Image (tube, rainbow, N blue to C red):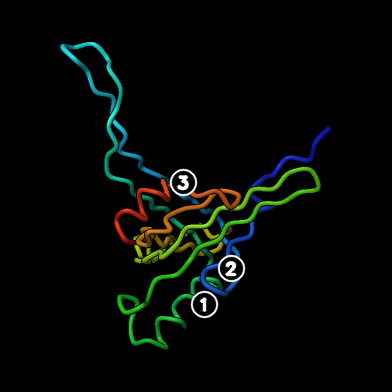
Amino acid sequence: MPHHISGMDVNVSLGTSLINVKQFTLNIEDGVKAVTTRGVPHGHVNGTLSASGEITLDTENFNRVIEEARKVGSVQQLGTFDIIGLGKTVDQSLKTAAYGCKLSISKLLDASGDGGDKLEHTIPYTVTDSRFVEINGVPYADQNFIETLGL
C-alpha cells in the first residue's frame, strides 16, 4: 500500500526560512470562461489569472515573520517572498512554488479563553510575480504568452 502525503508531510519555506505551519493553502483563480454562440457553448476565452492563499502559524513561527518585518521597518514594507511547499513520503511527492508573494495579516490573534491550544496567527498572501505558480516544476501559466508580454 502506498504511503500517501498528509499535512504532516508538508514543509513550507518562506523565502529562505523553513517555517512550521498549522495550515497552508494556495488557491488559483483561472479566468477561463466558456463562450456561446446564440446560447450554445462554442469554445472558451482566457481571462485574468491570479493566485493567493493563507498560512496559519503559531506564535513562535509568526514571530519569525515579524522579525523580518522589524529589519525593514514594518509589515507593510516587507518585500515579496517565494513560498515553496514540499510534501514528501517514500511513495509520493508534491512540490508547489508560488513566486513573489506579498504578505499581509488578516487574523493577528486567535486566542481561546479555555486554553488548551496554541495562539494562532493567519497571514494571507497574493502571488505577484509573472513566474506565478509551479506544480512539481511545471508552470501553471502559459509561458509562451508571458514571453509575448515581455515579462
Q: Earlier in the sequence, mark 1 or mark 2?
A: 2
- Amino acid marked by disc 1: Arg
Instruction: Identify the element where label 2 is drawn.
Output: strand
- The answer to whether the residues at label 2 and label 3 have Cβ atoms under 8 Å apart is no
Few, some or many C-alpha atoms within 10 Å of disc 2 (few <14, some 14-19, many ≥20)?
Answer: some
Q: Is residue 8 left or right of residue 22?
A: right
Of the pair 147 and 53, the residue shown nearer to us: 147
- Judge whether 44 appears above or below 149 on screen: above
Instruction: Identify the element where label 3 is drawn.
Output: loop
Q: Percent x, y for residue 51? A: 38, 50
- Where does the N terminus fall, quadrant-wise? top right
Q: Percent x, y for residue 97? A: 52, 57
**Residue plotted at (27% across, 15% down):** 41
- The answer to whether the residues at label 1 and label 2 have Cβ atoms under 8 Å apart is yes
Q: CA distance from mark 1 to mark 2?
A: 8 Å
Q: Is residue 109 left or right of residue 77?
A: right
Q: CA distance from mark 3 to mark 1?
A: 30 Å
- Amino acid marked by disc 2: Ile
Question: Which label lies toward us, 2 or 3?
Answer: 3
Q: Residue furthest right?
A: 1
Q: CA distance from mark 2 to mark 3?
A: 25 Å
**Residue plotted at (34% across, 87% down):** 73
Q: Which residue is mark 3?
A: 140
Identify the mark at residue 100; answer none if there is no mark: none
Of the pair 31 and 72, the residue shown nearer to us: 31
Q: Which residue is mark 1?
A: 64
Q: Percent x, y for residue 122? A: 43, 60
Q: Earlier in the sequence, mark 2 or mark 3?
A: 2
Q: Which residue is mark 2?
A: 19
